[in-house]
Amino acid sequence: MLFALSSCTSAKKVAVFKYIDIDDDCKMTYKATFFSDNTFVVHCKGDDKTVTIIEKCDYDFFSGTYSGEATKDGEIILTITKEPDWKRNSEYFEQILAENKKVFKRTRKSYFLKEIDSPESEKTSIQNGKITIDGDEYKRVLSFL
């Protein structure tokens, strides 16, 4: 999974950004961690409630590479190389529903990602410690210089 992308190398964290998504059905915290080997991973943690089930989430949502300085304001280029495998994740969720569980934990082992065949780079910038990733605004919470 994505965690292995960064945990198997000697890469060190250089910056962490956070985005919190709250609505009637869920409260999710997304952390984008940038590493010294120019990789990044977005991790999701929180509860997602539907009418019949509560999904306790703690998994990597997507990952990729970047160029630029994640520790300071300026231009940065992101390339998402792994994204959710919506088909496999939907099949897994249907299986959980069939088991009539009221609460289930979704971790890195049960949230599936897939390689993107032709990843595209997106130019963005960090301004006042904030960055937009995949349409959501994250705020820098840690920087390791």
Image: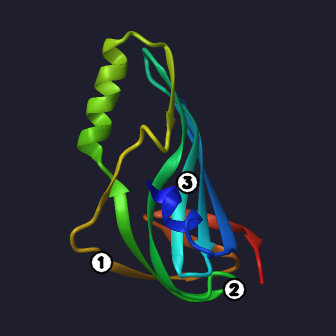
Amino acid type, mark 2: Lys
Residue underneath mark 1: 120
Q: Secondary structure at mark 1?
A: loop
Total marks shown come to 3
Can you say whether 86 is above or below 18 in the image? above
Residue 95 spot, x, y in % from top left = 30, 22
* Nearer-N-terminus badge (1/2): 2
Q: Are marks 1 and 2 in contact (CB under 8 Å)?
A: no
| Picture disc at residue 17 | none
Q: In terms of image quadrants, where is residue 145?
A: bottom right
* Nearer-N-terminus badge (2/3): 3
Question: Which residue is at a point 45% across and 41% down the rendered structure image?
Answer: 109
Question: Which residue is at a point 52% across and 57% down the rendered structure image?
Answer: 3
Amino acid type, mark 3: His
Question: Which residue is at a point 39% across and 9% down the rendered structure image?
Answer: 100
Q: Nearer the viewer, residue 121 or 19?
A: 121
* Quadrant of the rendering where the N terminus is positioned: bottom left
Question: Which residue is at a point 49% across and 68% down the rendered structure image?
Answer: 133
CA gap, disc 2 to disc 3?
A: 21 Å
CA gap, disc 1 to disc 2?
A: 23 Å
Q: Taking 102 as reference, is 47 left or right?
A: right
Residue 108 spot, x, y in % from top left = 49, 44
Q: Nearer the viewer, residue 44 or 140?
A: 44
Amino acid type, mark 1: Glu
Q: In terms of image quadrants, where is residue 89?
A: top left
Q: Secondary structure at mark 2?
A: loop
Residue underneath mark 3: 43
Give the image's coloring scheme: rainbow
Q: Nearer the viewer, mark 2 or mark 3?
A: 3
Residue underneath mark 2: 72
